């Protein structure tokens, strides 16, 4: 109960300034703000309770689960099998990411259905899964993070000059939305758990950098999707 109370207060502190600001704008910009104000306040209350429950679920279930899975992966023994598991874990978490589904819906709406939301989600999930496996391989093979990021973004910038202009902002926004409330805690806890059981490694340095790779993960596949659409 103390955890629920603390999370509830944290959410209120985070949401309340936005609620006050938007309510003030509604009051001054609309002649009859009462109906829309009531609708907004009801939505704000639902957000506060929903976000509290979500954060509680992350703290109680998702973080321990990610760390447990990460700590058990090295015990498999087969390096290729570890990478396969990491790929599917990263892809599965991405498919469940609510921010990505919002983006896919908006992209389908703006393009009139020319770019399918399901296809976009699939390509983004493949990219995140691939770079989740790359992040695991980086720890095992002791590859500097900077090398992967420089090579990845260099490829992304080259592709941005080839693909249709429409796909460039979609690709970079896809990278942003994957670092959402579901992917971030699981990927971070997965990295912490994996790095913590590898002796002789820099646990602090190896535990992080995952989000940088996850951010890069969707950009290249979505741009390749643009190449397919041309």
Image: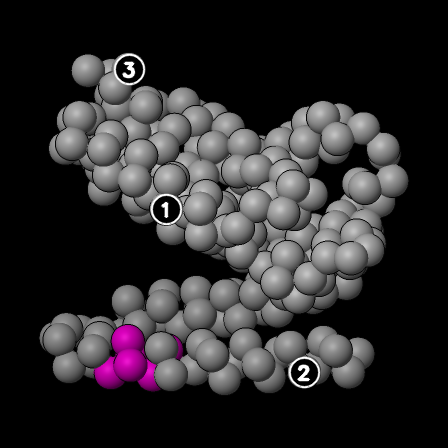
Name the N-terminal-most of marks 3 and 1. Answer: 1
Q: Which residue lies at the image location 47% right of the left edge and 79% below the top edge?
A: 14
Residue 9 image point, x, y percent: 60, 84
Mark pair 3, 2: CA separation:
49 Å
Q: Which residue lies at the image location 79% right of the left edge and 52% below the top edge?
A: 198
| Contact (Cβ within 8 Å) of mark 3 with mark 2 | no
Q: Quadrant of residue 222?
A: top left
Name the N-terminal-most of marks 1 and 2. Answer: 2
Q: Identify the mark at residue 228; answer none if there is no mark.
A: 3
Q: Quadrant of the image for the N terminus? A: bottom right
Say which residue label 2 marks. 6
Mark pair 1, 2: CA separation:
41 Å
Q: Quadrant of the image for the C terminus? A: top left
| Contact (Cβ within 8 Å) of mark 3 with mark 1 | no
Q: Tell me if residue 33 can be seen.
A: yes
| Residues packed near mark 2 inside 10 Å, few (<14), some (14 to 19) or many (20 plus) | few
Secondary structure, mark 1, is helix
Secondary structure, mark 2, is helix
Mark pair 3, 1: CA separation:
25 Å
Q: Quadrant of residue 57?
A: bottom right
Residue 194 image point, x, y percent: 74, 50
The colour scheme used to paint the residues is one colour
Q: Identify the mark at residue 150; answer none if there is no mark.
A: 1
Looking at the picture, tell me which residue is in the foreground, 23 or 138.
138
Which region is colored magenta?
Answer: 19-24
Secondary structure, mark 3, is helix
Please tell me whether residue 1 belongs to the stretch shown in magenta.
no
Q: Which residue lies at the image location 81% right of the left edge and 41% below the top edge?
A: 74
Name the N-terminal-most of marks 3 and 2. Answer: 2
Q: Which residue lies at the image location 67% right of the left edge and 83% below the top edge?
A: 6
Q: Nearer the viewer, mark 1 or mark 2?
A: 1
Looking at the picture, tell me which residue is in the foreground, 187 or 146.
146
């Amino acid at each position: 109960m103390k955890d629920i109370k603390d999370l509830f207060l944290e959410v209120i502190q985070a949401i309340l300034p936005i609620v006050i600001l938007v309510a003030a704008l509604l009051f001054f910009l609309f002649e009859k703000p009462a109906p829309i104000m009531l609708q907004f306040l009801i939505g704000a209350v639902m957000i506060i309770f929903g976000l509290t429950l979500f954060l509680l679920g992350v703290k109680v279930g998702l973080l321990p689960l990610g760390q447990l899975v990460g700590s058990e992966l090295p015990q498999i023994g087969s390096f290729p099998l570890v990478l396969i598991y990491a790929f599917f874990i990263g892809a599965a978490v991405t498919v469940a990411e609510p921010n990505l589904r919002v983006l896919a819906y908006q992209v389908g709406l703006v393009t009139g259905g020319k770019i399918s939301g399901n296809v976009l989600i699939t390509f983004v999930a493949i990219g995140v899964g691939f770079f989740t496996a790359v992040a695991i391989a980086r720890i095992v093979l002791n590859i500097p993070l900077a090398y992967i990021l420089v090579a990845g973004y260099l490829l992304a910038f080259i592709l941005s000059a080839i693909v249709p202009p429409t796909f460039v902002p979609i690709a970079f926004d896809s990278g942003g939305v994957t670092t959402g409330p579901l992917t971030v805690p699981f990927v971070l806890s997965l990295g912490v758990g994996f790095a913590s059981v590898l002796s002789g490694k820099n646990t602090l340095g190896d535990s992080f950098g995952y989000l940088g790779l996850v951010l890069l993960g969707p950009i290249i596949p979505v741009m390749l999707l643009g190449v397919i659409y041309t």
